[in-house]
Amino acid sequence: MRQEDKNRKNGIEINDDLTIPKLFHRQALKYGDGRVAMREKEFGIWRPITWKGYHDNVKQIALGLVALGLENGDKVSMIGDNRPEGLWAEMAAICAGGVGVWLFQDCLIEEVKYILDHSDTKFLFGEGQEEVDKAMSVFKECPKLKKIIWDNPKGMRNYHEDYLISLEEVKALGRKLDEEQPDLFEKLVNQGVGEEVALLFYTSGTTSLPKGALLSHNNMLTMGMHLMDVDPCKETDDYVSYLPFAWIGEQMMSISCGLQIGYTINFPEEPETAQENIREIGPHVMFAPPRMYEEMTRKVQVKYLDSTWIKRKFYEWSTKIGYRTANLKFEKKPISLFWKALDWLAYVTVQKKLKDHLGLSRVRNAYTGGAAMGPDHFRFFHAMGVNLKQIYGQTEVAGISVVHRSGDIKFDTVGHPIPGTEIKITEDGEIITKSSSVFKGYYKNPEATAEAIKDGWLHSDDKGFMDDDGHLVVFDRTKDVFTLKDGRPFSPQYLETRLKFSPYIKDSWVIGDKRDYITAVLCIDYAVVGKWADDKKLNYTSYPELSQKIEVYELVAQQIRDANKDLPDPAKVIKFTNLYKELDADDDELTRTRKLRRAFVEKRYAEILDALYSDVDTVHIDTVIKYEDGHEAHIKTDMRIIEVSK
Amino acid sequence: MIESNELNDKEILLELEHIHMSFGKVKAIADISLQIKKGEIHSVIGPNGAGKTVMMNCINGLYRPQKGNIFFKGQKINHLKPYERAAQGMARTFQKVEVFGGMTVLDNIRLGRHTHYKSGLLSGLLYMGKTAEEEKKHREFIEEEIIDLLEIEQIRHKPVGMLPYGLQKRVELGRALALEPDILILDEPLAGLNLEEVEDMARFILDINEEERWKVTCLLVEHDMGVVMDLSDNVFVLNFGNMIIDGPPADVQENPDVVKAYLGEEDLYATRR
């Protein structure tokens, strides 16, 4: 390790010997009962758990797993909502010498089976009845799986299978083992070195089956350290953990950063109450994929349309000021005293309250990553005074490698590499990375590993370039880049994010690679367009019906015209259609992190594609939808093909 | 599910003895006897106008039967008023939701606990001494346990009137449960709900009946045969104010009179799908 890595925050030195369990043990001893490690809202009240409580729980679960037969290197999977028990289970698995694997809470049975089987999972922590049901239905097909552990007793009273065990029972086994061998836990914690694998993370995979990325203790810890070198966090900070633990960004904040700095991790009561709970906590740091920020934007835009005249005027006035000062900051120009005073007024009258409603009033740094975010959204948040930064990274570097610096934000870039990270652009324009956080390889997949890591450089498969200020610009996934009619390369993602700035459009899919013109398939936002239709006294009964109303098409066409503005002619959307349903990860159209699986939708909606590039004005859809419980629904509908007038 | 032979040894919680109820010359129910044992889910089914709701109204005291006796926990309760029966541990939900639309979900549920308050009007008005202490104690936990059970955390502070019908039904169930009753009378809890809401509600009823925390005996009036046959330990079939059969679901399904009573109505075993 380099000298500079020493003597930073709290005297933590990340060397080859340091592992996540060692650090966890040390931090828990240091903070003890004096500091709150995490909080969970339960029965309407925020209930704190101190570091000692965190440590005791992890210790009991870890020893319980050992008592059940966990051996070094065994895989332990977790599935469920964000809650303390989930983090304890993960930490316990790693402390006991196992490897942690997280599954998305909404994974379908097939995906659960694939990951459990491929990862050779021996123990599975499910939250309650729903997760246990999923696991039980694939138990026979996963021969390595020994026990399914649950912690929420609701609905579990009639489950008596031998391979089921409650978390309380596991903890009791752990306590018993602790009495017999009081020094066992410390021994377990102190075994191992930083290079060993701690986590096995399945990447969402826009094209193929998920691949399991092996991440070491050192990968995770250096990741957190380098991020906090850029934006230091404080012990007294609050963080809200509500995004899936199966997403690397959440691991980075809860484990990589959380463990080193010791801030308080807050868990919402239920996924449905997350937004409200974020407001109650008022976190200092926030990391979320663009869709969360898009949702917030939409919320503000809709509330604006809904409010009284005077409120609308105040909002318009304050955003004008906000945009003006934000633009000056982007251009790194000085802000005159006059504008500073206006900005302060806008803050006091509107922005302060707006930020409070969104739970952003205390945010020092808000990050977005995982997918592209449009410049419009970016400006929107900065105009409100939120320090929103773009990051770039992937599961294979344990999180992120590039981030904006405060005061040096350009909304079409992702910023500079974080310390300890080298970024280069290959001759083909591919972004490659070298750092101590680059992963160990894909589990049971040497070919893919060899393709991803060449000479120590991680190949991202993303196209990009460095701009004059040394900022990295990420263009798009290599295979997604379009060639326009005039031969220029073009990023569909860019146009898609622009379209999504409209509150009426929830998802967009732009088509046009090597075609004569660009087209788009759009999914309206049911709630927002529904409200709009109510105001216009339009009758509708369902999403398919609403999406195909001619009035709605006119509304959407106007949004497209707005997005088309200032684009070169060959990059403008010429024809579009509204999809009769929303894109859904359960139908394989999106990944679990809600990225569009382009190849899949192109195949699935081939007839729509054909219609967009032929001389018709409707396309007939006749398809069967299969629900989770097995019953099917027949959908017959006509979709319009509309040309956008200039 | 509790086996019915196991139930035979259980104590009788509620008993109707030869109940007659007429409105003028219309005989609503005639000579009805029913025994509900502690811990079971006992359903009452029957075609429209069979007298199911009249029977429920007799049980919770809205109507006084002209003949017959009602015993609750071994005590004769014929003379008791509805609120007195509630204080004894009898709670009810209604066919059409009867919630307080302008109040929040939490307040509606809190209201269900009023029979547990012992302090008088004056100290209540002044909100001091016993009242304040009592309210704090009640506020502590049960309301939140109910909110957790019924999965309505996200609407805790919303006015009930603004909620969709399915959620209002849940709130009404929550309010009845806040009374911590010994017996819960559910009058068509599934009416007007969509498939998903029916599944949720059926699960809640089972939870209330089986979970150690609640263990509430349920008297269920329902039209949805599939759900009734799945949930109930015993089914009582009523037709034109008379009992056809009272027994375990399997026996009821095979009874020719039951099939006959339902002919032309709907397929007895059809569930909504």
Image: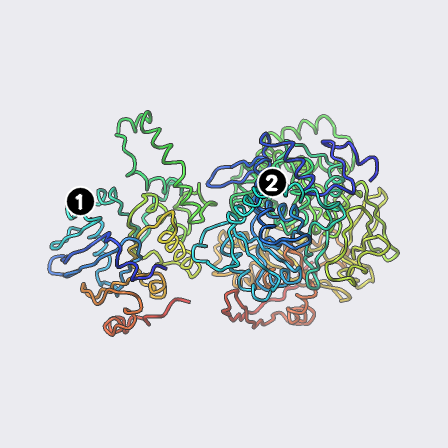
Helix, strand or loop for disc 1: loop
Classed neighbour count for the residue bearing mark 1: other residues with Cα under 10 Å, few (<14), some (14–19), many (≥20): some
Is residue B207 visible in the rendered image? The answer is: yes
The residue nearer to you, when weighing B107 against A413, is B107
The residue lying toward the viewer, choosing from B123 and A352, is B123
Element marked by disc 2: loop
Query: Is the residue marked by circle 2 packed among few (<14), some (14-19), or many (20+) residues within 10 Å?
Result: few
Residue occupying image coordinates x 65% and y 45% = A95
* Residue designated by label 1: B80
Q: What residue is rendered at 57% in x and 39% in y?
A: A56
Question: In the rendered view, does B151 fall on the left or right side of A565?
Answer: left
Q: Quadrant of residue B47?
A: bottom left
For the point 28% across and 53% down, the residue is B38
Residue A328 in sight:
no
Chain letter of the residue carrying label 1: B
Q: Tell me which residue sits at (68%, 67%) in the image.
A: A602
Residue reaching furthest to the right? A427
Q: Same chain, marks 2 and 1?
A: no
Give percent across and percent down for residue A503.
60, 50
Amino acid identity at mark 2: Pro
Residue carrying label 2: A182
Indicate the position of residue A632 as horizontal and vertical percent values.
51, 70
